[in-house]
């Protein structure tokens, strides 16, 4: 049993705790900590967790902790992950790996020096929907890939999120927040990216909160809120992506992969399941049944897979090789926009093996 030390008990922690305690067989949360102690205390009571740490450093010093789970806010990922690595602990981090490209590079360098793994979210691509899409692509259902497009549009989080400010501050914005899901799905379906170009904008300098927790409060926007990106994949295929917090409503596909024989409509990469739709000329649209496990909200799947990988002495599927490549793409759009040209990527990415079928639910290999 791999023992998990849980850092950060915020909004997304509930589904992690539910899944770790009830779904995945080979991992166990043995202790939690949070800057707001009450949150950690509530988690200990609700999920019958044995340890409540005073701070993250006490957690890192616990010899019983095998892996640190870092689900703090994005701009805190670097500091928490670095401290855990320095304490000799491998880390599974929420997305993104760091708030900047430089943070990601430093963390991976440190992990390599320490002989430790960092793995990280998103793990939604390991679910039934995108794994089924990958199988269709690899089997040639749409022929050779000729292009791809992705859209994530909304009008921000200030109308519903209980703590929306950080989405508009350092480490936030639609590309850093939602882009990891889309880019991770795309590279798992199509392979690594060679270079990127982009343009960004910030149409609204301020946001007025209408969520009940901060109703009427004004947020000053510090980051771009619309990103228009283009990616040239290692295969030579070109794809595009739009992520925006500035659009009230749009009728756009989530992800589509275009092939020489047809089109594949990919489900929402923020989810583990969803409809997979294949269009072949002359046959129309066909919804394809998913062929893999984990169609439901299975956050923690990547953590469980990492635990299995560490036991088996292999690289986790969502290792820093993937999360650093994704971070270079995410930050690359804005860096390319600032330069007025294209950004050649320094990282290389090779797809890991697809998820294994036929295993008992909650068991990873």
Image (tube, grey):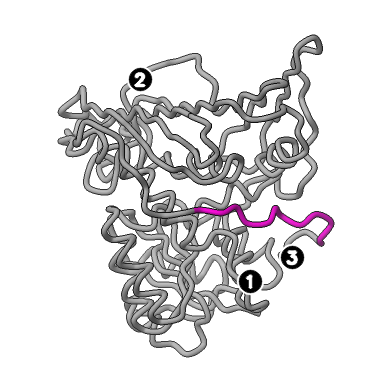
SS for callout 1:
helix
SS for callout 2:
loop
Query: Residue visible at 69% across and 37% down?
Result: 133
* Residue 107 image offset from top left, x and y in percent: 34, 68
Mark 1 is surrounded, within 10 Å at the Cα level, by few (under 14), some (14 to 19) or many (20 or more) other residues, namely some
Q: Earlier in the sequence, mark 1 or mark 2?
A: 2
Above or below 88: residue 156: above
Q: Which residue is mark 1?
A: 309
Q: Earlier in the sequence, mark 1 or mark 3?
A: 1
Q: Which mark is residue 247?
A: 2
Q: CA distance from mark 1 to mark 3?
A: 12 Å
* Residue 299 image offset from top left, x and y in percent: 57, 54
**Viewed as shown, does residue 4 lie left or right of 32?**
right
Above or below 83: residue 295: above
The answer to which image quadrant residue 268 occupies is top right
Q: Which residue is outermost to the right?
A: 358
**Viewed as shown, does residue 351 lie left or right of 234?**
right
């Amino acid at each position: 049993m791999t023992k998990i030390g849980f850092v950060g008990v915020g909004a997304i922690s509930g589904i992690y705790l539910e899944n770790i305690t009830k779904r995945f067989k080979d991992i166990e949360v043995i202790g939690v900590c949070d800057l707001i102690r009450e949150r950690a205390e509530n988690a200990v009571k609700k999920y019958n967790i044995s340890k409540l740490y005073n701070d993250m450093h006490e957690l890192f010093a616990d010899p019983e902790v095998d892996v640190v789970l870092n689900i703090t806010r994005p701009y805190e990922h670097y500091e928490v992950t670095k401290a855990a690595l320095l304490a000799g602990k491998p880390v599974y981090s929420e997305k993104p790996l760091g708030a900047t490209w430089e943070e990601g590079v430093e963390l991976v360098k440190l992990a390599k020096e320490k002989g430790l793994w960092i793995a990280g979210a998103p793990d939604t691509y390991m679910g039934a929907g995108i794994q089924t899409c990958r199988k269709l692509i690899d089997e040639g259902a749409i022929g050779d890939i000729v292009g791809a497009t992705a859209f994530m549009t909304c009008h921000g989080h200030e109308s519903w999120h209980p703590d929306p400010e950080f989405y508009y501050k350092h480490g936030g914005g639609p590309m850093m927040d939602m882009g990891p899901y889309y880019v991770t799905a795309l590279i798992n379906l199509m392979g690594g990216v060679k270079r990127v170009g982009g343009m960004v904008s910030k149409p609204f300098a301020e946001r007025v909160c209408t969520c009940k927790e901060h109703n009427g409060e004004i947020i000053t926007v510090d980051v771009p809120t619309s990103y228009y990106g283009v990616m040239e994949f290692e295969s030579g295929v070109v794809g595009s992506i739009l992520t925006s917090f500035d659009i009230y409503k749009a009728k756009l596909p989530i992800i589509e992969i275009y092939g020489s024989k047809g089109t594949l409509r990919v489900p929402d990469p923020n989810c583990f399941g969803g409809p997979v739709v294949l269009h072949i000329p002359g046959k129309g649209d066909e919804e394809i049944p998913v062929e893999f496990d984990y169609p439901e909200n299975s956050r923690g799947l990547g953590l469980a897979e990492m635990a299995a990988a560490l036991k088996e002495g292999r690289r986790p599927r969502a290792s820093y090789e993937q999360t650093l490549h994704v971070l270079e793409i995410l930050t690359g759009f804005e860096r390319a926009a600032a330069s007025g040209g294209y950004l050649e990527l320094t990282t290389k990415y090779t797809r890991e093996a697809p998820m294994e079928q036929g295993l008992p639910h909650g068991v990873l290999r």
